[in-house]
Image: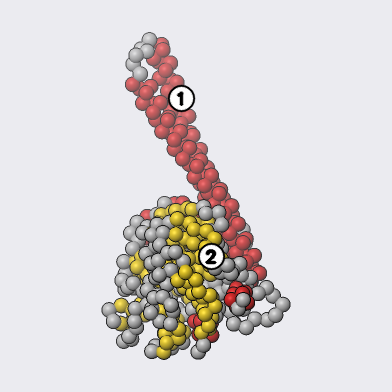
Amino acid sequence: MSVQKLIEFQLQTSGPSATFLMSGSKCLVRQGEFLQVVNLQQKQVEAKIPMNKYIGQPSSLVDDVYYEVNKNTLTSTNVETKETETVQVSNNLNATAFVNYNRLIFMISNGQLLALYLDTKELVPIGDFVPATNMFQYSENEMASYFNNKLHIFNTESHELKTKEQYLSEGFTFRANNDFVQLSTQIFKYDEIIYEPSATLEKAIPFLNANLIAFTGFSGLFELLQGDIFDELSQFCACLRFQRSSNIVIEQEQAAPQSKMVNICMQYFASIKAEIANGKTETEAIQPYKNDLIQMLTILGLGAQVVQETEGKQDSQAEIQQLILAQKDQEIKELQKDKNELQNKLRTCEDQLNQKGKTNDSNVESQLQNTIRQKDAEIAQLQRKISELNSKVANATSYAENTVKTQERSQPVVQKPVEAPVSQAPVIQIQKKTTIENPAPTQSTVPTGRPMTLAEKVAMFSKK
């Protein structure tokens, strides 16, 4: 079981870290008070983006955008432009452990397993877990944590929680088949030491890609390794099936602003459109999302009829949005009607005052003017909502089209998802990003006649 060190160099930061391999022979290291873009070939830092001190917060890198959860907010930072956006995703989030899957982050918060969708900023509960400070994938539909000297295993589809007598040391953990690989003062498989790093890996979040693993030690020492064991780990944890807790999430969505539910509906319709493009019939594509959509659209005042009417139509997303916009237009018309009636009353009041010469008695007139101003404000607010909805339509449509194009390009091998009963929330299957350049097979050997992978590039220039 040979492991080869490809690159090692020292950064000027220290403490807990998260490391990500990027395209173009670069990597991203979050450590201390900086987000650092590192050129692997030149072994130097190209850019340092100031941030709050990193203490192990949930984080992920998607298409050169770095995401980080801080308490109740999600911050996204474009690595190229340095632009940053922060949005609130919860009122009571206390993340103690996480695992990221490209566009999804799984977290433990207050003893509950949660999933955060980075595209829509939607935070949904999966089920009750344990208040652990570590978490790793145990199988294709299980998450595990080592807590109180026992291994707690949570089924992400059935939501069953079981315990197992199993000793594990502190440190970041991977599992492949029946083997546990952990990172601490060494990288070891059970009692067999695979590799001894030059610096302690305490609170170091590594990055796994094919047969490569990258990590940054507590002292700021970056290392990139290559080995067959890492390829085995990559393939084992490349896919996870899960089902969210429908009862809890609907309660949260009922209390959430309507705009958030509109976002969720748009995400569902983008997924439906992508599944139709991949060959499913319209009815098959909408079925897993039907119950959730009916409940949310009922809350929005649109009712279940919308979902039933749009079955069998590929442009269902646009139709739903048009119905929402029509409802907002109707609200504006009603407010405008109220405003016109108030203006008529105001003119009548002014005429009466002029006829009687009571120019100083303006209490009634003032009250009507205040009411009209209030109606104007309500109309303006609704108009802003319509503008936001129009923008969301454009974004959702663009996202759906890009999703279809990406899937057509990559054509990944996807396992058949478990069919969810009509009364349950949809079963969702996700895949980790297994390449950091052009899509390629997950195996360590790939056919010739295609662009070099990062592993091959690194292997080439590390020999120089």
Percent x, y of residue 329 = 52, 42
Asked if residue 388 is positioned above or below residue 337 in the image, the reply reads: below
In the rendered image, the residue lying farthest to the right is 449
Q: Is residue 221 left or right of residue 39?
A: left
Q: Which residue has dot 1 on it?
A: 344
Please name the residue shown 44% across and 53% down the image.
86
Q: Residue at x 59, y 56 (%)?
A: 397
Residue type, numbered disc 1:
Asn
Question: Does residue 334 appear anywhere in the picture?
Answer: no
The one of 383 and 164 positioned closer to us in this rendering: 164
Tell me: 119 left or right of 169.
Answer: right
Identify the element where label 1 is drawn: helix
The colour scheme used here is secondary structure
Q: Position of residue 351 (x, y in %)?
A: 43, 16
Residue sitting nearer the eye, 389 or 20: 20
In the rendering, at what x and y percent does residue 425 appear? Answer: 45, 69
Choose between 11 and 16: the one closer to the eye.
11
- How many C-alpha atoms fall within 10 Å of the one at disc 2: few (<14), some, or many (≥20)? some
Relative height, residue 101 to residue 258 (above, below): below
Residue 44, disc: 2
Q: Nearer the viewer, residue 141 or 216?
A: 216
Query: Percent position (x, y) of residue 347?
Result: 45, 21
**Quadrant of residue 52 in the image?**
bottom left
Residue furthest front in the image: 464
Lower position in the chain sequence, tag 1 or tag 2: 2
Residue under the image location 45 percent in, 29 percent down: 341
Q: Quadrant of residue 189?
A: bottom left
Locate the C terminus by quadrant: bottom right
